[in-house]
Image: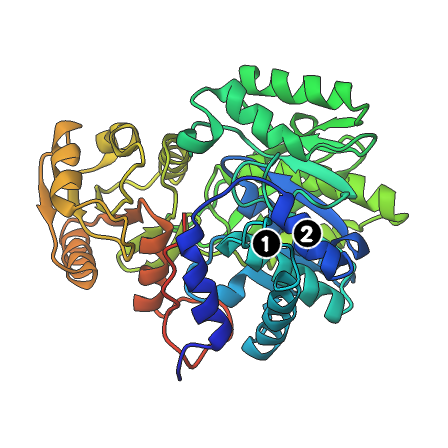
């Protein structure tokens, strides 16, 4: 099947690059009749954990019987993943119609309004899809930052800010305080905001902004959870835990997002869900929490792809992600050695990422990602060695590296960790036939807009 027209036109917009600001979005949406004003948005920003948090919130809301949209980025395999209705990516016909509508509106704008970027166009398409599909409740993830992000045209039901760390420093600033200022830009006057656990210097900025705008602040640290370690062989595909909010004890839940770091995201999602329930005038039942967490779909987050050998995929690509992966690996209490298959995009803090994980690695393979911005395997291999991994190889192709790493793991009763890039994660999901959404007839969408 040929690439749909709307995807070809979207890809051409990459030449406009990343352009923070809301001028174009407001102009385009105004000519569309402001579809963003027709939704109640749970608006989520943050450096790490925001995608998982969005997925948890969406899944529980649907388990509670509420029609719900989910807007996320980037996609792993198909653009359609970004725009979901009731848990399923919308089809190409729906996206084509919405794209045509947005492009027609853009053509009516004055010549001094800059053309929409890839992400601005995608966001406007999402708002049109939700209007056409009759979806009024949407869990909406920011793309980059918050204050000047294309999604920040909504007046949200509530805002959520997940853990803040150093990433995209060339755009958002080189300190936690500067990045927190950008993320806190999604907080709106008199609208509640849920704040996850995060470094104190970032939290101080977020709290100050909430006070300035008289936004009621809900601290996700008041929601407690504890992991119940599974008794079977590690590499388990479910994470069992106990969950308690300030208002109730939900008790035992389990989730296929099995990394120990998800406990923080679960607490943030649970807090946001209780606030949302109050605002919507309904109580979300304990059973909806249990069903939603158990049935959430969000691949490439400490995902066990197979058990023999245990092969784990995580799209984490910054130092905070590496620390989360390290904690998850240790919590799994696996007794054998670990091999790494890793590829990165250039410009990421690869050294800091590898410095955190290298002490746990007995062997490593450096690979390219499917991005035009990929770092060369030779550079990655050099950094692996510099940070203490003794046995390192480069691989000309990802499948060959996976085969070699898994053969090594079988021989040494070990496991394999694949990490470093969401580009890489998408390729691995295809190789393992582990893409969770309905099969598409076309191949992977080429997407240099993935971050």
Q: Residue at x 17, y 61 (%)?
A: 403
Q: Earlier in the sequence, mark 1 or mark 2?
A: 2
* Residue 8, disc: none
Q: Is residue 402 above or below residue 281?
A: below
Along the viewing direction, whichever of 420 and 156 lies nearer the viewer: 156
| Residue 185 position within the rendered picture, expressed as x and y whole percent measured from the top left | 65, 31
Q: Identify the colour scheme used.
A: rainbow
Q: Nearer the viewer, mark 1 or mark 2?
A: 1
Q: Which residue is mark 1?
A: 111
Along the viewing direction, whichever of 340 and 144 lies nearer the viewer: 144
Indicate the quadrant where residue 291 lies: bottom right
Residue at the front extreme?
A: 111
* Residue 27, disc: 2
Number of marks drawn:
2
Q: Residue at x 80, y 57 (%)?
A: 38
Q: Are marks 1 and 2 in contact (CB under 8 Å)?
A: no
Q: Is residue 215 above or below residue 116?
A: above
Residue 227 in view: no
Q: Is residue 258 left or right of residue 410?
A: right
């Amino acid at each position: 099947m040929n690439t749909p027209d709307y995807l070809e036109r979207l890809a051409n917009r990459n030449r406009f690059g990343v352009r923070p600001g809301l001028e174009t979005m407001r102009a385009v949406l105004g000519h569309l009749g402001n579809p963003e004003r027709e939704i109640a948005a749970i608006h989520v920003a943050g450096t790490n954990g925001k995608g998982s948090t969005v997925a948890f919130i969406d899944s529980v809301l649907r388990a509670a019987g509420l029609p719900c949209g989910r807007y996320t980025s980037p996609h792993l395999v198909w653009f359609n993943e970004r725009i979901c209705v009731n848990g399923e990516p919308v089809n190409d016909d729906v996206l084509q119609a919405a794209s045509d509508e947005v492009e027609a509106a853009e053509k009516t704008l004055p010549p001094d309004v800059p053309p929409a970027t890839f992400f601005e166009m995608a966001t406007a398409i999402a708002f049109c899809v939700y209007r056409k599909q009759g979806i009024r409740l949407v869990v909406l993830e920011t793309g980059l930052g918050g204050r000047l992000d294309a999604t920040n045209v909504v007046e949200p039901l509530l805002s959520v800010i997940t853990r803040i760390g150093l990433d995209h420093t060339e755009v958002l600033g080189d300190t936690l305080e500067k990045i927190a200022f950008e993320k806190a830009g999604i907080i709106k006057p008199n609208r509640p905001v849920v704040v996850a656990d995060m470094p104190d210097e970032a939290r101080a900025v977020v709290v100050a902004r909430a006070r300035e705008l008289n936004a009621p602040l809900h601290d996700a640290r008041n929601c407690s959870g504890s992991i119940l370690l599974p008794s079977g062989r590690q590499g388990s595909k479910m994470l069992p835990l106990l969950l308690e909010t300030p208002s109730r004890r939900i008790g035992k839940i389990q989730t296929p997002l099995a990394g120990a770091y998800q406990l923080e995201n679960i607490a943030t999602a649970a807090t946001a869900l209780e606030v949302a329930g109050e605002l919507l005038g309904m109580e979300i039942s304990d059973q909806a929490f249990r069903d939603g967490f158990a049935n959430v779909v969000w691949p490439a987050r400490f995902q066990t792809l197979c058990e023999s050998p245990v092969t784990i995929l995580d799209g984490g690509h910054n130092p905070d992600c590496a620390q989360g992966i390290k904690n998850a690996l240790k919590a799994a209490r696996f007794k054998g050695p670990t091999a790494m298959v890793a590829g990165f995009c250039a410009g990421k803090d690869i050294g800091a990422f590898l410095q955190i994980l290298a002490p746990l690695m007995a062997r490593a393979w450096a690979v390219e990602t499917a991005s035009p911005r990929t770092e060369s395997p030779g550079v990655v291999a050099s950094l692996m060695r510099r940070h203490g991994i003794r046995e390192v190889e480069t691989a000309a192709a990802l499948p060959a590296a996976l085969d070699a790493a898994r053969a090594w793991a079988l021989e040494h009763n070990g496991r394999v960790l694949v990490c470093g890039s969401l580009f890489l994660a998408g390729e691995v999901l295809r190789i393992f036939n582990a893409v969770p959404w309905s099969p598409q007839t076309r191949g992977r969408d080429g997407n240099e807009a993935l971050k």
